[in-house]
Amino acid sequence: MKYLFKNLIIAFLVFLAIAGSFTLFNNTTEEAEELSLSNLVEQINQENVSVITIKGDKLEIELKDSTKQEATKERETSLTESLKNYGVDSEKLKLVNLEIKGESGAAFWVGNILPFLLPLLIIGFLFWFMFRGAQKGQMKAFTFGRSKARLIDPKDKKNKIGFKDVAGLKEAKEELEEIVEFLKTPKKFIDLGAKIPKGVLLVGAPGTGKTLLARAVASEASVPFFSVSGSEFVEMFVGVGSSRVRDLFQTAKKNAPALIFIDELDAIGRQRGAGIGGGHDEREQTLNQILVEMDGFEVNTGVILISATNRPDVLDPALLRPGRFDRRITLDLPDIKDRKKILEIHSLNKPFEKDVNLKEIAERTPGFSGADLANLVNEAAILTARQNKKKISQDELRECIEKVLLGPERKSNILSKEEKEIAAYHESGHALTAALLPNADPVQKISIISRGMAAGYTLKLPLTDKHLHSRSEFIDELTVLLGGYTAEKLVFKELTTGASNDLQIATELARKLVTKYGMSEKLGPRTFGGREEMVFLGREISTEKDYSEEIASQIDKEVSKFTDNAYKTATKLITDNRKKLNQIAQVLIKKEVIERKQFEALMKKKV
């Protein structure tokens, strides 16, 4: 309706412009004096007339003094007869130049018919335009239940992605290679009585390459690939979601063998019966239709459904049973070797300095997903362009690691001299305790330049990827977290709000040691507090208290015991190495940043 009103206004303005141009065109000619035939005869007899131009019944008269005049003759008689009837002198008439001009067809249309025809044409165009819009609206209403899946043509070599373009994920690719082989040569499996898997569920943290793997399967198998997000099924109208599911599977069956990829499956695949919306909830109807299409009465041949989610815990059990999603493939975060390969892939089309060491960058990025690493390389390229350099160096890559982790530097957030000293001793406390404890991760960098919400930071990274963590590591980590708090208290005899985040993390870690990891010597191998989760929200909103008030008191005591012991350890370490703390803090105040090699040299240097 908005666009129709806009077009109507435009058409009206065009009509006004055309009408105005006609008005100006008609008014550009100088208006001539109208004469009667008797006056014309009088002018001829006085030899004042030079030329008379005859255009039908109209007479254009030009006098000898170049004055223009007009007259109208009688229709039935010729001009000479009319003039003779009014008593014109024949000799004087011979002195007048008589010209006869026929009115042209173009002038007739422009001057007479077009001013009346043009408004009719404009009104007709407006009616046609309005009916055309109404027909489009009707067609959209009929196609509202069609699937919005995007088709990726296997013949499109420009956007083709193979398994070689996906670094790491070796086990996941092996599982999916069987799907590719089945799509290419199904007879080999059918002869042995094997059935094609109907569904593959890719589970992993955001950015681990679930969508990329699905596209690689389609490209490797050279089959049509229908991609759609789970949120695109559900609309405000009842029945649209299930209709789109039916249309999607029908289209895929017509193009079989084919792959269907539903991203963010948890948007429509959440567990039913949550008590929200009842049995007629639109999302549940969409899920029911997917279940029927995957394993209903109609045999589903040649169509494989691949879905991705990072919340498998909220999915309906009916989706996960054999016969629907037959395979569940977990995608882990890449280890150091895979991170190096991912960095190499994202570095192919970017100019690097010869001394760039991607292995070092991979070592500094534990916990990074594939998407994080791609973002890291891209940010390094942007930073290089901003500095007007031609090639990306190791410094830009290191800088962007911290940018991805903590945010950009806030150089405008200048600390006062006192705050700078407090921040330096705080970060030096973290770094010193980390260097002195055997199970703490090595310090990579110390900085008192603000990033994000932090006034400073101490970057600690493990030398190798870890999948299991021991009790000793957690206890040392608690000590390191309280190192900044302890340094502030010992040096300045005062506390600031700078340690609030450290205290929050330390308290949460201590509580997990007691309630989740079973690492409390007093309470023993038991967990406390189950998760109470609302399915429709899909997130933890409270903790179920499955223990008595007496146990709750013991939990609080054990949490306090862990934090108190960590504080005592940090206090002893910093007190015994006070000179070393001062040395690190003074260097940090002067340079603002201490890298790993410089920090290790400071620790070895005698005070």
Image (cartoon, grey):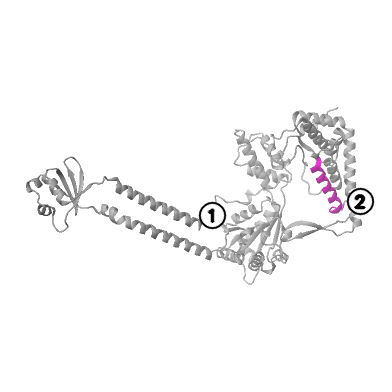
- Magenta residues span 499-518
> From where the camera sits, is residue 187 visible?
yes
Q: What residue would you read off at disc 1? A: 155
Q: CA distance from mark 1 to mark 2?
A: 63 Å
Q: Residue at x 64, y 40 (%)?
A: 379
Classify residue 16 as left or right of residue 244.
left
- The reply to whether residue 223 is in sight is no
Identify which residue, 504 or 573, lies in the foreground.
Answer: 504
Q: Is residue 430 above or below residue 22?
A: above
Of the residues shown, which amino acid type is indicated by label 2? Glu
Instruction: Look at 88% across and 46% down and name the residue there.
Output: 562
**Residue 331: percent from left, percent from top:** 71, 53
Who comes first in sequence, dot 1 or dot 2? 1
Q: Is residue 107 left or right of residue 182?
A: left
Question: Is residue 503 part of the magenta span, yes or no?
Answer: yes
The chief SS type of the magenta part is: helix
Residue 572 image offset from top left, x and y in percent: 90, 37
For the point 15% across and 51% down, the residue is 37
Whole-percent x, y for residue 538 in the image = 72, 58
- The answer to whether marks 1 and 2 mark residues whose Cβ atoms lie closer than 8 Å is no
Along the line of sight, which residue is nearer the eye, 294 or 314?
314
Which label was assigned to residue 521? Answer: 2
